[in-house]
Amino acid sequence: MIHPVQFLTGLFIFVVLFVGAIALSNNYHVIQRLKRDKPFVNLAMILLLSGFLFNLFGSLLTFLFSICLPLTVIFVHAGLRLRNLKNKIENKKEFIGVTRTPMGVLLQSLDFMVNEKLKE
């Protein structure tokens, strides 16, 4: 990492904006309706606002890196994930809602659930 302070600053600002957007969307019905009707608009607003703030701070590259690093980790994890019997059982348990994964909690907070069975 070339600039760890900028990276941590960028990550901190992005997390604050993300948590703030979720908190605002849980308190205001207009934003909840917008999230339900157009789910990607909420994420786009978070990305645009954080990009604007990082541009003001001169840390746009850090912002892009803080976005690309988690995506890279997700793709590497998905590529290396084993498809054995234990994993298939875990997937079925997640589908019927017996276990909750961190990604499931995140998607539910953003209202990105496609299947109504997954919503509680």
Image: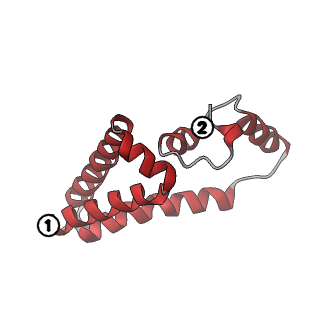
Callout 1: SS: helix
Callout 2: SS: loop
- Residue 1 appears in view: no
Question: Which residue position holds label 2?
Answer: 101
| Of residues 29 and 88, the one drawn nearer to the viewer in this rendering | 29
Q: Name the residue located 14 percent from the left edge and 66 percent from the top edge.
A: 56
Corner quadrant of residue 48: bottom left
* Dot label at residue 98: none
Could you tell me residue 11's position as x and y percent?
Answer: 30, 53
In the displayed structure image, the side of residue 75 where residue 93 appears, left or right: right
- Residue 74 against residue 116 in the figure, above or below: below
Query: What amino acid is found at the position of numbered circle 1 in the picture?
Result: Leu
| Of residues 97 and 24, the one drawn nearer to the viewer in this rendering | 24
Could you tell me residue 97's position as x and y percent?
Answer: 70, 32
Q: Name the residue located 75 percent from the left edge and 34 percent from the top edge.
A: 96
| Of residues 119 and 37, the one drawn nearer to the viewer in this rendering | 37
- Separation (CA) of disc 1 from disc 2: 35 Å
In the displayed structure image, the side of residue 54 where residue 44 appears, left or right: right
Number of marks in the rendered image: 2
Quadrant showing the N terminus: bottom left
| Of residues 72 and 117, the one drawn nearer to the viewer in this rendering | 117
Quadrant showing the C terminus: top right
- Residue 55 appears in view: yes
Q: Residue furthest top?
A: 98
Question: Which residue position holds label 1?
Answer: 56
Disc 1 crowd rating (10 Å Cα; few below 14, some 14-19, many 20+) is few
Q: Name the residue located 79 percent from the left edge and 39 percent from the top edge.
A: 92
In the displayed structure image, the side of residue 99 where residue 53 appears, left or right: left
Query: What amino acid is found at the position of numbered circle 2 in the picture?
Result: Thr
Corner quadrant of residue 68: bottom left
Corner quadrant of residue 30: top left
